[in-house]
Image (tube, rainbow, N blue to C red):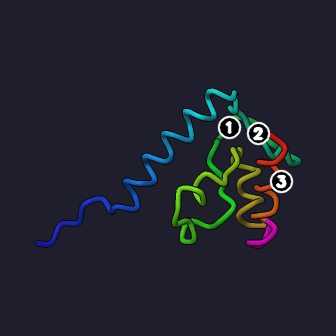
Amino acid sequence: MNKRGKSTRSTERQKWHKELLAEWQSKGINSCEFNYDGCMQTFGQALAHSKKRRFITTKEDYWEVGLACIKCHEKLDNVMNHEEMEAEVKRIINER
């Protein structure tokens, strides 16, 4: 039987995630940064990257991210196209 372990990419992302959360905690980033209509602030928070997961290959790509509640994250993922999503996340980063 061939058992699969964790991929190198997964391990790298876990490390980047811990570093990112520590950075955000030090800056007080702890609620949704997008604030679209129906924003739920802290409910269902998730990282909203500027790129889809399959296109994130470097730490810099991973760190190009905003914090989004479930409603705002859904809008980014399901309503906006890739270019709009990337522009919106970069806008949030620049406004910090």
Nearer the N terminus, badge 2 or badge 3? Answer: 2
| Residue 82 is one of the magenta-drawn residues | yes
Relative to residue 92, is residue 7 depicted above or below? below
Residue stretch rendered in magenta on the structure? 80-84
Q: Quadrant of residue 62?
A: bottom right
Labelled disc at residue 40: 2
Tell me how far mark 1 sits from mark 3, CA to CA.
22 Å
> Residue 42's spot in the image, x, y percent?
70, 34
Q: In the image, what residue type sits under mark 3?
A: Arg
Q: Which residue is mark 1?
A: 43
Q: Helix or strand or loop: what does disc 2 sit on?
A: loop
Q: In the image, what residue type sits under mark 1?
A: Phe
Relative to residue 22, is residue 3 depicted above or below? below
Q: Which residue is mark 3?
A: 91
- Nearer to us: label 1 or label 3: 3
Labelled disc at residue 53: none
